[in-house]
Amino acid sequence: MNDKHYQERPDAELMRQWRHELHQNPEIGFELPRTSAMVAKLLEGWGYEVTKGLAETGVVGRMSFGDPAKGPVIGMRADMDALPITEATGLPYASTTPGAMHACGHDGHTAMLLGGAELMARRAAAGELVGNGTVVLIFQPAEEVGGSDSGAQRMIKEGLFEKFPCDAVFGIHNGPTEEEGHMHFRPGAFMCSSDTVTLRFKGSASHGATPHLARDAALAMSATVLALHSIVSRNLNPLDTGILSIGKLSSGTVFNVIPGEAELVLAVRALRPEVAARIHERIAEVTHAQAAAYGCTAEIETDYGYPSVFNDPAVTNLAIATARRLFGEEVVEPEAEPVTASEDFAFYGLSRPSAFFILGNGVSGHRDGKPIGHVSVHNPHYDFNDKILPLGAEYWAGLAEDAFQQGALK
Ligand SMILES: [Zn+2]
Ligand SMILES: [Zn+2]
């Protein structure tokens, strides 16, 4: 089915060219001058009203159809940023910038939404796109940066939804393990939140020969490592999803000094905000108690990153219906497993009813230009699959048509 789709669409080749152009010239974080200029120019060429400069290099394209007052305003989001990774696919269109690579498929997300934009404009001009409403195409930078200042957060802070009051926002991520062209949806909690916690232990140092004169911060840290691992197993409901991973332990300088300071850095993830809150509460109790037990003190610093992605059920059901209509029941999974990774799409969901879902990428790994089976995103061998580009474009246009014709979501 996907081969057929690919061959039948005259614009599939065009989308492939945009994707390769983006892939060859990856840009990172908020600094996407080349990428955003390309997106803005294409949108303007198709008659979109284009706003530049939100979150530095974010681009928003708006177009209305029929009588917009009678229909919904539908937000569609693509992320445009690459990762600080050196590419190892060996593909002819591999990154020409060492240390920068589209290893999460955001080149494909951008090309698919551009393809959808072109298709909607073309169908409207031919009188084929009937119904009332407005599309707001949100091309954002800096999804991959993590923490409390990412592209979505900055665009919202700089007035995205005041300038473009969307009734609903949709986002697609390519799926590295899902079959080519399959679509996976999940109403409700879908992706985990992600926070970083730093624990600093203070005791007092001493000569290694006189432990009775020390308050050993390394020992307090070590006891805390073990105690922290009881939180998920003993303080969470086993049916809830929560993760506590200790990524960095540091203390000491030399063999004959007992350290007076030590530091742990942890990642906390959870599918629901209440679960994340419970983990943070227990981290504080466990850390202070362990530090005190070894005569030390502890300071806790928490950087709240991306919240969990929550898919509004009504919005997600509309997205599922469009996928079934366009591609058939057999490639649509309406109750997919939740995902433990995080996404800054979550911030759109805090402001507007939203739905985030997966379009299967199929075989994604390449070495020396040849397929090597599945690899995960953020892997130097990852590549977005060109064959799903026309599916994505078709999907975006179909979603707008369904929302406009049903007058849904307004
Ligand atoms: Zn990523
Ligand atoms: Zn991504």
Image (cartoon, rainbow, N blue to C red):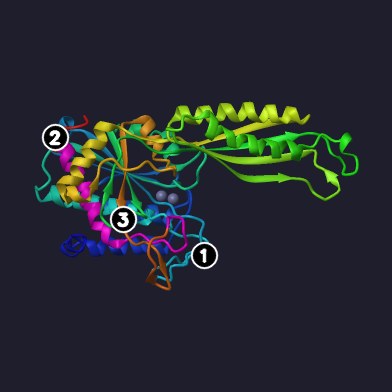
For residue 161, what is the image quadrant? Answer: top left
Which corner quadrant of the image does residue 7 belong to?
Answer: bottom left
Measure the C-alpha gap from mark 1 to mark 2: 48 Å
Q: Nearer the viewer, residue 53 or 134?
A: 134
Q: Which amino acid type is marked by label 1?
A: Pro
Which residue is at the front of the view, 378 or 18? 378
Amino acid type shown at disc 3: Ala
Quadrant location, the N terminus: bottom left
Q: Can see residue 46?
A: no
Q: Which residues are magenta?
A: 376-404
Q: Tag 2: residue type?
A: Gln
Earlier sequence position, callout 3 versus callout 1: 1
Q: Residue at x 64, y 29 (%)?
A: 286
Q: At x 17% / y 30%, what residue is drawn?
A: 69
Are the residues flagged by discs 3 and 1 in contact, CB closer than 8 Å? no
Q: Give the residue pinned by disc 1.
A: 98
- Is residue 279 one of those drawn in magenta? no
Q: Identify the residue under disc 2.
A: 406
> Where does the image place residue 56, in percent across and percent down from the top left?
45, 45
Q: Earlier in the sequence, mark 1 or mark 2?
A: 1
User: In the rendering, at what x and y percent does residue 366 appear?
Assistant: 40, 67
Please give the label number shown on residue 124: none
Image vertical order of residue 23 relative to residue 72, above or below: below
Cα–Cα gap, marks 3 and 1: 22 Å
Is residue 274 in view from this perspective?
yes
Left or right of residue 330: residue 302: right
User: Looking at the rendering, in which quadrant would you find the C terminus?
Assistant: top left
Disc 2 is placed on an element classified as helix
